[in-house]
Amino acid sequence: MAAMFTCCLGCCGDGASGHIPLKEMPTVQLDTHHMGIWGIGVATQKVNLNQVPLGRDTNSLVLRHDGSVYHNNEEKNRLPANSLPQEGDIVGVTYDHVELNLYLNGKNMHCPASGIRGTVFPVVYVDDSAILDCQFSDFYHTAPHGFEKILFEQQIF
């Protein structure tokens, strides 16, 4: 089963977060409250969370606030010009261990990106007073078929 995460453009301040291993394919929703510099996507444990914007190296694959999707300092895709997230929009992200896909207010943006390798974690960063609210379950919009909330990896001894 795949997982999804969404964020409502609302996590305040300056900084980044992550480090929940993705066992299943995730869905995330992002709610945009105050526009600034932000990004959402997936990253390995080796990513430098103190260097935003992410997507500058092989350790992150992210949608940036300007609609570009970056990995290894290369633009992998871009949201359509008329579909850039605005304050109050819901950005959904799915990742199936190969491809990152983006949704705006529940609509597939047909903007896939890939290239990151290894175990990845959801990552969200904000700067310039951006505010993002993130949902890792109980989504605003129904997750695409085959995707569900993030399941936490557990070890059984």
Image: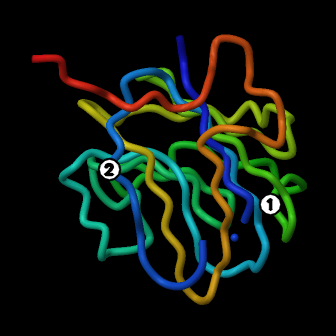
Label 2, label 1: how far apart the Cα atoms are: 25 Å
Q: Nearer the viewer, residue 77 or 12?
A: 12
User: Mark number for residue 58?
Assistant: none
Q: Nearer the viewer, residue 2 or 53?
A: 2
Q: Residue furthest bottom?
A: 128
Q: How many marks?
A: 2
Task: Please tell me in which quadrant of the rendered image residue 68 appears.
Answer: bottom right
Q: Nearer the viewer, residue 14 or 79?
A: 14
Could you tell me which residue is drawn at 68 percent across and 63 percent down? Answer: 133
Could you tell me which residue is drawn at 27 percent across and 26 percent down? Answer: 154
* Amino acid under disc 2: His
Give the left or right position of residue 119, taking residue 132 as reference. left
Q: Earlier in the sequence, mark 2 or mark 1?
A: 2
Give the left or right position of residue 59, taking residue 113 as reference. left
Could you tell me which residue is drawn at 53 percent across and 35 percent down? Answer: 113
Sort mark 2 into few (<14), some (14-19) or many (20+) by Cα contacts within 10 Å: few
Task: Please tell me in which quadrant of the rendered image residue 16 appears.
Answer: bottom left
SS of the residue at dot 1?
loop
Give the left or right position of residue 35, taking residue 118 as reference. right
Q: Nearer the viewer, mark 2 or mark 1?
A: 2
Image coordinates of residue 41 in percent, x first then y, are 50, 48
Q: Which residue is mark 1?
A: 85
In the rendered image, which quarter contains the C terminus? top left
Q: Which residue is mark 2?
A: 19
